[in-house]
Image (tube, rainbow, N blue to C red):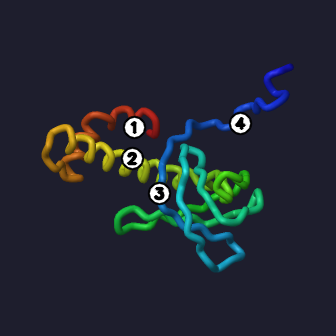
């Protein structure tokens, strides 16, 4: 049996996915209503989120991802929509239409990582580290890596 036979599927993703649970809303272009959801994971090329209903492959959708008091608006194309029978929800995989949208998601991911870092450092030191302080530490430690990946 070859690697592509049986239950083994060939990996089709070009980018590494990172777990990121974050609220989002999505809208199919022909529909005026936004539906509430949350992300499962993100990558440089797209993201996956849950939905009560499936969405047709190749559909173009609008995503709205809140971050503090800002809402990032992103255009994406549905790559797949598969029902997860354990939860009853659909797992919708999308690809970003514009590179700038991929960069927006990367920034959101970094901000959430900084927040996780802030909480961890606060627990480690026993004092509450502010978000600006955590941001400065994060940038000092990881900005060179971020620059290599995205500039």
For marks 4 and 3, the one nearer the N-term is 4
Identify the residue position indicated by label 4 in the image: 12
**Residue 55 falls in which quadrant of the image?**
bottom right
The relative height of residue 52 versus residue 4 in the rendered view (above or below) is below
Tag 2 secondary structure? helix
Residue under the point 43% across and 49% down: 109
Identify the residue position indicated by label 2 in the image: 110
Identify the residue position indicated by label 1 in the image: 146
Q: Position of residue 87 (x, y in %)?
A: 64, 55
Quarter of the figure that contains the C terminus = top left
Tag 1 secondary structure? helix
Q: Position of residue 135 (x, y in %)?
A: 26, 47
Identify the residue position indicated by label 3 in the image: 22
Depth check, mark 3 against mark 1: the one in front is 3
**Residue 76 falls in which quadrant of the image?**
bottom right
Q: Residues within 10 Å of mark 1 (few under 14, many from 20)?
A: few
Work out how far the residue at label 1 is from the one at label 2, CA to CA, in angstroms.
Answer: 9 Å
The relative height of residue 149 versus residue 40 in the rendered view (above or below) is above
Q: Do the residues under discs 4 and 1 have CB atoms within 8 angstroms?
A: no
């Amino acid at each position: 049996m070859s690697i592509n036979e049986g239950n083994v599927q060939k990996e089709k993703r070009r980018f590494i996915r990172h777990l990121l649970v974050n609220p989002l809303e999505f809208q199919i272009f022909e529909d005026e209503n936004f539906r509430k959801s949350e992300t499962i994971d993100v990558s440089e090329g797209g993201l996956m989120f849950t939905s009560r209903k499936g969405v047709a492959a190749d559909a173009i959708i609008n995503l709205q991802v809140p971050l503090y008091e800002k809402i990032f608006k992103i255009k994406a194309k549905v790559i797949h929509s598969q029902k997860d029978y354990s939860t009853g929800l659909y797992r919708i995989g999308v690809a970003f239409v514009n590179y700038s949208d991929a960069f927006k998601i990367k920034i959101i991911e970094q901000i959430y990582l900084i927040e996780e870092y802030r909480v961890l450092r606060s627990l480690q030191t026993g004092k509450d580290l502010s978000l600006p302080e955590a941001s400065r530490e994060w940038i000092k430690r990881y900005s060179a890596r971020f620059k290599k990946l995205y500039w």
